[in-house]
Image (cartoon, rainbow, N blue to C red):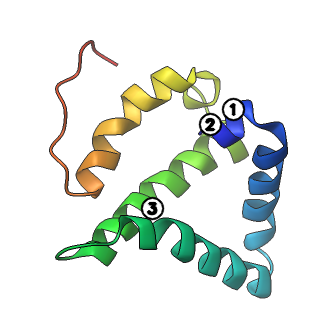
Amino acid sequence: MHAFDEAPQSGAALMSMFQDAVPDDAVAALVKEAWEGEIVKRLAGGRYARRRAAAFSSVLVGLIGTRCLLRLEPVGSMSREEVNRLFERQLRLALGMPPRRLARPV
């Protein structure tokens, strides 16, 4: 989320990549390759590693689509801290990590 919220150049590049991936099969293949190379490999390890990485990726791509592409409310206008609080549990569970107790409600 940092790349979208606070780094305009990388955020714009990522946004363009996601938008271009949908209608163009060649670009979609490049995005898939980059995503698997950068994200999935870093998360992989242990039993069911690829499944956990896929679950994590699905949650993250859904969040990016909701917040950055579609700007759906209330997620679109939440602070980064609010988004982290709201989605941390799902991301941790996707990775097979135990959820943390919330310090305060979302």
Q: Residue at x 82, y 38 (%)?
A: 8
> Where is residue 103, by image quadrant?
top left
Residue 2, numbered label: 2
Relative to 56, is 45 on the left or the right? left
Q: Which amino acid does label 1 sit on?
A: Asp
**Residue pointed to by mark 1:** 5
Q: Of the residues tagged 3 and 1, which is closer to the observer?
A: 1
**Mark 3, other Cα within 10 Å: few <14 / some 14–19 / many ≥20:** some
Q: Residue at x 38, y 26 (%)?
A: 85
Query: Spatial distance from mark 1 to mark 2, Cα to Cα?
Result: 5 Å
Q: Which amino acid does label 2 sit on?
A: His
From the viewer's perspective, is residue 57 above or below residue 22?
A: above
Q: Quadrant of the N terminus?
A: top right
In primary-sequence order, the first of circles 3 and 1 is 1
- Asked whether disc 2 touches disc 3, contact meaning CB atoms under 8 Å apart, the reply is no
**Could you tell me if residue 70 is visible in this image?**
no
Q: Which amino acid does label 3 sit on?
A: Ser
Q: Which sits in the foreground, 22 or 41? A: 41
- Asked whether disc 1 touches disc 2, contact meaning CB atoms under 8 Å apart, the reply is yes
Q: Quadrant of the C terminus?
A: top left
> Where is residue 54, by image quadrant?
bottom left
Q: Of the residues tagged 2 and 3, which is closer to the observer?
A: 2
Q: Is mark 2 on a helix, strand or loop?
A: helix
Q: Is mark 3 on a helix, strand or loop?
A: helix
Residue 92, numbered label: none
From the viewer's perspective, is residue 9 above or below residue 73?
A: below
Q: Which sits in the foreground, 89 or 37? A: 37
**Could you tell me if residue 30 is visible in this image?**
yes
Q: Residue at x 50, y 65 (%)?
A: 39
Q: Which residue is drawn at 28% across and 57% down?
A: 95
Query: Spatial distance from mark 3 to mark 1, Cα to Cα?
Result: 20 Å
**Residue pointed to by mark 3:** 58
